[in-house]
Amino acid sequence: MKKSIILLTKSKKYRNYCIAGIDINNGEWVRIVSNDTNIHYAVKQEDIMYENNEEAEIFDIIAIECEKDRKSYYQSENYIFDNAYYWEKIGKATINDVLAIKPCENRNFIFYDTNKKVASDYLKTINSDDIYSLMLICPTNVEIIVKQWSHDEEKKITMNFEYNSNRYRYIPITDEIFNNQHRTKIDGNYSLHYNPILIMSLGEMYERDKCHYKLIASVLT
């Protein structure tokens, strides 16, 4: 099966990539995954290269040959790509093109509640038709937190924001381009003077606490 998507997330995952976008025909979410368990189904860099050796980028419109879907108890949007075929760039979109297909989503909560993580056991109680793990949101009162929590690790970039009158705090950001723009700042809280569009993703289970963390996979302007 072939999926034609606007690429909206290209975030780091186990030194490879988490890839997702919206179907250009119906606006449904599509997360592209591999069948490589060693990298937790992430997509390798060589697999996001077009036949002309250019790398897929955010807002590219891409045709991707997929083998089958790979739904799980916490992610319903996954499709395994067929690495026998190159990805094909068929166009370039703008943020307005995206919003025309996928307006900002209006749910009561981001992934079921206002916490920063969701227990694995809770997700397994939800009807499979109600499972989702990707969102496009338009938050307000956005604040960036830059902090080096310990001397032996690099600065962490997280975000506080409001969505449907609820405040979400210290949500991790996996958009490396956005993070690199802020890592040079001194530790502190920084208010954004614009409201970005966020692509939210629910990550895989963290073994220590058996929870799935809410992530900002892409910051779009």
Image (spheres, grey):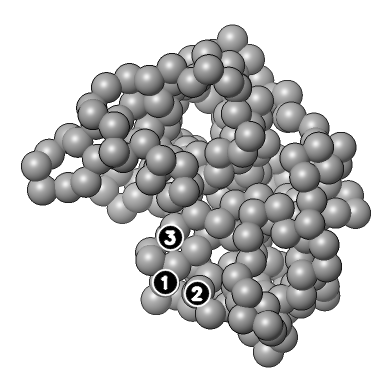
Q: CA distance from mark 3 to mark 2?
A: 10 Å
The local secondary structure at tag 3 comes to strand
As drawn, the residue found furthest toward the right would be 25
Type of the residue with mark 1: Ile
Secondary structure of the residue carrying tag 1 is: helix
Dividing the picture into quarters, in which one does residue 156 lie? top left
Q: Which residue is mark 3?
A: 13
The answer to whether marks 3 and 1 mark residues whose Cβ atoms lie closer than 8 Å is yes
Mark before the other along the chain sequence, 3 or 1 = 3
Which mark is on residue 44? 2
Residue 199 on image: x %, y %? 60, 40
Residue 183: percent from left, percent from top: 31, 40
Q: Residue 84: image x %, image y %?
A: 68, 89
Give amino acid for label 2: Lys
Q: Nearer the viewer, residue 124 or 39?
A: 39
Binning the other alpha carbons within 10 Å of mark 2 as few (below 14), some (14 to 19) or many (20 upward) gives some
Task: Indicate the quadrant where residue 139 lies.
Answer: top right
Side of 209 where 6 appears, left or right: right
**Image quarter hosting the C terminus:** top right
Marks 2 and 1, the one that precedes in the sequence = 1
Q: Gap in Å between the C-alphas at discs 2 and 1?
A: 9 Å
**Can you tell which mark lies on residue 39?**
1
Residue 96 location (% of width, % of height): 81, 37
| Residue at position x 50%, y 54% in the image | 11
